[in-house]
Image (cartoon, rainbow, N blue to C red):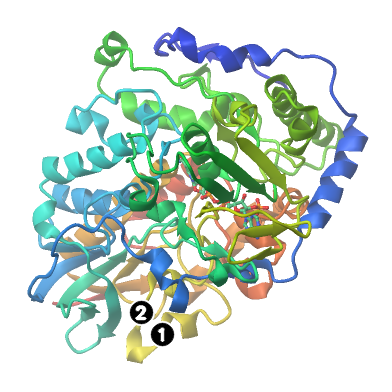
Amino acid sequence: MVGRVARRRSPGVPPIAPDRRVAAMTQSDPAPTATLDEVRERYQRERAKRIRPEGVGQFQDLTGDFARFDADPFLEGDVSRDPVDEDVEVLVLGGGFAGMLTAINLRSHGVDDLRIIDKAGDFGGTWYWNRYPGCMCDVESYTYLPLLEETGYMPTEKYASAPEIFAYCQLMGRHFDLYRHALFHTEIDEAEWDEASGRWHVVTDRGDHVRARFFVTAGGILAKPKLPGIPGIGEFAGEAFHTSRWNYAVTGGGPTERMDRLADKRVGVIGTGATAVQVVPQLAGTAKEVFVFQRTPSAVGERNNGPTDVEWFKSLEPGWQRERIRNFTQAVTGAKPEVDLVQDGWTEYMWEDTHVKTDDPEEAAALERSDFESMEKLRRRVDAIVEDPATAEKLKPWYAKHCKRMCFHDEYLPAFNRPNVHLVDTDGRGVERITAAGPVVGGEEIPVDVLVFASGYEVTTELAGRLGFDPRGRGGLALSERWADGPHTLYGILSAEFPNMFMIGIVQAGFGTNFLHFLSESAKHVAWTIATCEKDGVATIEADPQAEEDWWHVLLDQSRMIAGYSASCTPGYYNSELSRDEKTARNLVYTGSILEYAGFLEQWRDADDFPGAKVVKGP
Ligand code: NDP
């Protein structure tokens, strides 16, 4: 029976600045605005409007004429250098948290001969690229930022802003002496396994040639921006860019400075996901007019950010961060820990894991009601904040709570009370067309000077496409060929025919609210495996095809727990835009808790004989 266990407040929750409490006052509990039957029917109606036959094919990737949307706007000065020709033990693709944590773990095991390659100009990954105004982490910093006890760093706020997180990545780079391993502004063009030398041969766009015994792909899940494939998108004559390549030359200002070039500009924002929720309030305060083009509204709860209580932070006992990370994941996956250490919107709304499947009709009804009540609360929050009833109605999310990433923000909804902010709701259909002047909705052209695409990333499209090259394993076999019918992996990390290649990404691996929890566990596992291979004289390690199938069935069984829920959701990247065929179905993530996923990895390490992997000993 589903019962709401009261969350006990942790004595260590930092205080919130009083002026940030405004939004909290809007959440009284009046009568629901609709019955459960009405809501069910409404959810399905809204979902039906949004289903597109093109599925994930509806997006425009950043190639050809659109490659300019992918260029690095933060590139400074001349970054040319001589090509590198070298042999290393480990080559890590990616200098974001996953790559850095892999390197740090390898170093702690004594593996120091490593190279990190990234197309960005510094460490940081997503935090290098995402410098849009208002960018911040939606998971609290004490839980999200890795290795705080090791670096001795105290985040300034409960929810750290992007510049602080980027600076923390650089601090990690210095603290763990990672810069000497890095080649930045460098993209891998080719990676091929060479049987004779037992090495990966990797060629980059800078003419480097690196031969590595182990190859780790940690390219990030939010690394490949996408544009909506709206007809005419290339015809827009004004300035246009994606949020992850924010063009401050156009807007003026910087991540923490006022965008002074927008005062006389009409700015359009396409998309209303987690990114737009952070961007719109910033534009609202600086641009002459802001037009927010909405296909599906986000569910936006209160944020309540505030400065870190220094005394509280100093009082934390060694081991506190590991415990807090664990506690947060338990709290947002229905495990109901005795104490809720983080006490925020995530732990409040996700306390009940309502998307699990149960055969008990009473329990199923209770779960549905709990989900409905959470979303009702968020819909009521819109009514309480947004003054114009028609605009409020359009900003209400009509889907279940696990369908899209929930957002938390205290300035997004109030932005729609400003006279210069206009919601252009497309009733689920999206922008029809883009002309030289601007987007067209309902046959009406809305002229803008600047168009911001807050349209997200490729998350579960083919790995070779997302990496930007097609790794070649034994006998020159391309990953796209081996995975012609979809991915085959052991824990999402190893694949047969690709010896000594380790993947850190969500496909067939873990996923959860605190992505850093998943990355930390994956990096620890990959580094342990490589270090153990080195110690035990293992020449090659790869997945056994049978073990890949066994893992696939674990993923399938687990996903059946939420299959009905996910299929009844409005489309989005969580459910591959509802366009799963047999091939994309294999892009599943492990839909249980990160703690369970980490448990699989831990068991594997404890077994000590690499179960499910084909291992060849040798020099
Ligand atoms: P999303 O994919 O979540 O959102 C893309 C938006 O573009 C959606 O609102 C989508 O509408 C809209 N869109 C797509 N095509 C069209 C169209 N033709 N016309 C109009 N609108 C369209 O991307 P985000 O960048 O917002 O977020 C991606 C992920 O990044 C998040 O889920 C989160 O994991 C992460 N993130 C994390 C943050 C953090 O603080 N940790 C902050 C920001 C992002 P529709 O919903 O209908 O598809």
Q: Which residue is mark 1?
A: 478
Residue 533 has which mark?
A: none
Residue 51 placement (x, y as % from top left): 76, 61
Q: Residue at x 59, y 17 (%)?
A: 23
Vertical placement of residue 576 versus 414, above or below? below
Using the image as rendered, state which of residue 125 and residue 263 is in the foreground.
Answer: 263
Q: Residues within 10 Å of mark 2 (few under 14, many from 20)?
A: many
Q: In the structure shown, which secondary structural element does the residue marked by tag 1 occupy?
A: loop
Q: Is residue 310 above or below residue 46?
A: above
* 173 in relation to 200, above or below: above
Q: Position of residue 607 (x, y in %)?
A: 36, 54
Mark 2 belongs to which amino acid? Pro
**Residue 329: horizontal and vertical position, in percent?**
49, 34
Measure how far apart labels 1 and 2 are at the Cα level. 6 Å
The answer to whether any part of residue 568 appears in the image is yes
Circle 2: element type: loop
Q: Are marks 1 and 2 in contact (CB under 8 Å)?
A: yes
How crowded pointer 1 is (Cα within 10 Å; few <14, some 14-19, many 20+) is rated as many
Up-down: is 448 above or below 29?
Answer: below
Position of residue 546 in the picture relative to residue 181 (left or right): right
For image coordinates 8% across by 56% down, the residue present is 180
User: Which amino acid type corresponds to the residue marked 1 in the rendered image?
Assistant: Ala
Q: Name the residue tied to disc 2.
A: 471
Question: On the image, which quarter does residue 33 sit in?
Answer: top right
Q: Residue at x 69, y 59 (%)?
A: 440
Give 475 or 84, whichever is nearer the viewer: 84
Using residue 597 as the reference point, say whether residue 425 is left or right of it: right
Left or right side of 200 for 279: right
